[in-house]
Image: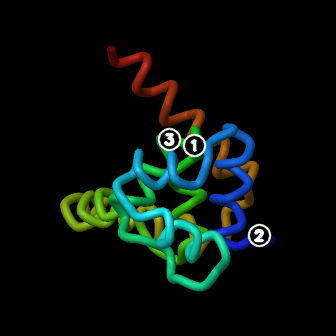
Amino acid sequence: MKTFGETIRDLRVAQDLGLRETATKVGISPAYLSRIERGKERPPRPEVIKALAKLLAADPDVLFRLSSSTDPEVVDYLHDQPEVMYLLRYIKEANFTETEIKSLIQTAEDMKVNTH
């Protein structure tokens, strides 16, 4: 599995973006981005991770997982909605499979579509 920095570099190269251009667009120095990509620096703040995800057309959740961090918006939501935390614990303790989780997501999406 690739590291956070390696993934950022691969995404940046795939988007044909230079190091300086990318760093400038997300509001960090090129030297800092270079150190992140080479694994010499810990992953950046959540706001920078989100900006990188947007710029590089990447799934922010994947980048947060690779950074061993959690999107602060998700953490806030979990604190505000204790039922969601209960649901997550249930899914974990019941050992839901990937297929079951995908089915649960599809059911939730169908519920939302049918109520609007």
Place of residue 71 in the rendered image (x, y in percent of width and height, measured from the top left): 38, 62
Residue appearing at x 68%, y 58% in the figure? 9
Say which element carries label 3.
helix
Of 89 and 25, nearer the camera is 25
Q: Measure the alpha-carbon separation of dots 3 and 1.
A: 4 Å
Numbered disc 2: secondary structure: loop
Is disc 1 surrounded by few (<14), some (14 to 19) or many (20+) residues within 10 Å?
many
Relative side of 59 to 111, left or right: right
Check whether the beta carbons of the residues at disc 3 and disc 1 lie within 8 A of each other: yes
What is the three-letter code of the residue carrying label 3?
Leu
Q: Which of the numbered marks, if any, corresponds to residue 55?
A: 3
Q: Amino acid at mark 1?
A: Leu
Percent from the top left, x then y, of residue 57? 58, 38
Q: Which mark is residue 2?
A: 2
Task: Name the image quarter holding the C terminus.
Answer: top left
Query: In the picture shown, does residue 80 fall above or below 54?
Result: below
Q: What type is the residue that disc 2 sits on?
A: Lys
Q: Is residue 84 visible?
A: no
* Residue on which disc 1 sits: 56
User: Which one is closest to the eye, mark 2 or mark 1?
Assistant: 1
Number of residues whose C-alpha sits closer than 10 Å to that of mark 2, classed few (under 14), some (14–19) or many (20 or more): few
* Residue 97, position as x, y percentages in the image: 73, 60
Element type at mark 1: loop
